[in-house]
Image (tube, helix red, strand yellow):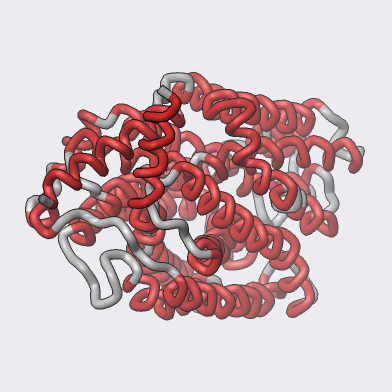
Amino acid sequence: MENNQAQAQNSQAKVMPKLKFSEKLGQGIGSMSVNLIFNVVSTYLLFFYTNVYGLKPADTATMFLLVRIIDAVASPIYGTWVDKRTTKFGKYRGYLLYLSLPYAILSVLCFYSVDTTYVMKLIYAYTTYVGLSLLNTFLSPLGAMPAAMTRDNDEIAQLNAYSMFCSNVGGMCISFGVPFLVTGFSGAYTGQASQKGWFMTMGIFAIVGLVGLLFAFSRIHEHYHMTAEATETVSFKDIFVQMKVNKPFSIFLVYLILAFIFMTIVNSAGSYYVTYNMQRPDLLKYFNLLASIPSFILVPLFPWFKRRLGRKGLMLGFSGVLMVGLLILYFGNVHNVALVMTGKLLASVGMIVTTGYMWAFETEIVNYGEWKTGKRENAIISSVCSFAVALGLALGGVVPGYFLKFIGFDAALKTQAAGTLHGILTMQSLLPIIFIVISMILFSFYSITDSSMDKMSREIDERNAKAAK
C-alpha cells in the first residue's frame, strides 16, 4: 500500500514542476502591488470622500453600491472572455503588462480633489472610482495565476504564503504610511487642508504598485492550461455548471462575500473609531499598523497551522480570535490605549489568518472543477470569485456609509454626539461579528482535504495522459 502511494507521489512529482523562488516572489509582489493600490482605496476612500473631498456619507454609500454592482456584472463576463483567449505573453500573464499603467493612473485620480460644484464633484468621483474598480476586476487573472502555475499542495501553500507575506508588507506600508505621509505632505490628515497630502501619498503608492506589477509580469510563468479543444468549448454557461457540480466553489463564494463585508466594515470604521471615540487621531497610524505587523510572524506559519488544525480548525479557530478582539474594543475603556491596542492586535491576528489563508482555497477549487468537468477554467472561477469580492466590498462599503448617516455622523463636527459615538463603536465591533458568525457556520461545510486534493490531481494527470496518447 505504502509502495503504491509512494509511486503515485513520485509520478505526480514528475508532472508537477517545482516553482522557482523568482516565480513565487513574482506572484507575491504582484498580489502586493494590486493590494497596495486597492487596499488604500478600500480602507481610506470612504474617509477621504466624507472628511476631505466633501461628499455626504449617504451619497458615498450609494456610489460604492452602484460601482460594485457594475463590477459584479462585469466579472463573470470578463472571466469567460479571458478563458477563451490567450495573450501574446500567456493566457493570464499579459494582463499584468497591459493594465498596470492605467491602473496606477486612475488610483491617483481617485484621490484628486476637484474644485467645482457638488454635482460635478460627485460625477468626477463616480467616473474615477468606476474606472479603477473595473481595472481591478480586469486584473483578476492574477488571481487565476496560481492555478496555472501548479497543482501541487505544498507549492499552493507556498504561493499563498508568498502572496500573503508580500501583501502584508504592503498592508503595513498602507496602515502606517498613509496617515504619516498625508500629514507630512499637508500638515493635516482631515479637511480641505489635507487634499494635497492625499493626492501626493496616493501618487507614491501608485508608482510602487506599477513597478511591482511589471516585476511580477517579468517573473511569473504559466505551466497548466486547458487544451485548445477545451478552450473552444468555454462559454458563459460554464459558470453555472461549475457552481452546480463544484460544491466547495459555491461555499467559497458565499464565504468570500461575508469575509469582504466584515473586513471592509472593520477597516472603514477604524479611522472614525480612533478619530472620534478615542479622540486620538495621532494614534491612527499605530492602530492601523497592528493590522499588518502580525502577518510577518503568522504568514510563514500558515502551512503549520493547516497541518496542526486542518482547514476547518484553522478558519474557525482564528475567526474566534477575531471576534474576541472586536469584543474587547466594544466592551473595553476606549481611552485605555493599551487595552484598545490589545483588542486590535487580537482582531488583526484573526483577520490576517482567516482572510489570508482563504485564498489557498481558490486553487483547490480550480482542481476540483477540472476533476469534475475536465476543464481547468482558472479565469472563470477567479472572475466569479472577483464577483463575490465585489459584492462583499459593495455591501461592506454601503453598510458604514448608510450607518454613519443613521447615527447622525457630521464630518463638520470635531466632537460627535454620544449616540453617534456609540454607533461608531457598534460599527467597529458588533456589526462585523454578525457576518463572522455566519461565515463560520458556512465554512463548517467545506469538504476538500489534502487526501482528496492528491487523489484529484492523480486522476487528472492519468486522464490527461490517456487523452494525449
Q: Is residue 245 visible?
A: yes
430 lies above or below 301: above
**What is the x, y in percent for residue 218?**
44, 77
Quick one: 403 or 119, which is closer to the camera? 403
Residue at the extreme front of the image, as rendered:
3
The N terminus lies in quadrant? top left
- Does residue 375 appear left or right of residue 224 in this picture? left
272 lies above or below 101: above
**What is the x, y in percent for residue 63?**
41, 55
Quick one: 119 or 460, which is closer to the camera? 460
**What is the x, y in percent for residue 364?**
39, 39
Residue at (77%, 48%) from the top-left corner? 274
**What is the x, y in percent for residue 179?**
74, 65
Q: Is residue 397 visible?
A: no
Quick one: 235 or 327, which is closer to the camera? 235
Residue at (91%, 38%) from the top-left corner? 336
